[in-house]
Image: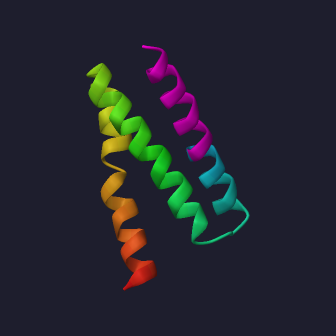
């Protein structure tokens, strides 16, 4: 379970880093950082079978897909 602990902290850092970059208007790297954190937290929610985590972060994934599509297409 140590790997879960590290995944949580790394994902938290990525989400907070993405949020900071958004507040500093540093785009599009903010989407990639925050999105990686969201994926990490979603994986954590799946492993722990935590529905609150899955609801919060899992539903953010489509939003980040929209943002990435906006950048490239």
Which residue is at a point 62% across and 39% down the rendered structure image?
Answer: 13
Which residue is at a point 39% across and 45% down the rendered structure image?
Answer: 39
Q: Which residues are magenta?
A: 1-14
Would residue 43 appear left or right of 71 to someone viewing this image? left
Would residue 25 appear left or right of 44 to someone viewing this image? right
Q: Position of residue 41 (x, y in %)?
A: 42, 36
Query: Magenta stretch containing residue 11, yes or no?
Result: yes
Residue extending farthest right = 24
Q: How many marks?
A: 0
Query: Magenta stretch containing residue 41, yes or no?
Result: no
Q: Position of residue 32 (x, y in %)?
A: 51, 61
Which residue is at a point 62% across and 52% down the rendered structure image?
Answer: 19
Which residue is at a point 41% across and 79% down the rendered structure image?
Answer: 70
Report which quarter residue 64 is drawn in: bottom left
Q: Is residue 28 above or below residue 8?
A: below
Would residue 18 appear left or right of 68 to someone viewing this image? right
């Amino acid at each position: 379970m140590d790997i879960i602990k590290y995944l949580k902290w790394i994902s938290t850092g990525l989400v907070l880093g993405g949020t900071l970059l958004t507040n500093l208007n540093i785009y599009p790297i903010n989407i990639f950082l925050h999105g990686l954190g969201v994926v990490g937290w979603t994986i954590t929610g799946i492993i722990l079978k935590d529905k609150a985590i899955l609801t919060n972060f899992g539903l953010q994934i489509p939003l980040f897909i929209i943002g990435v599509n906006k950048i490239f297409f």
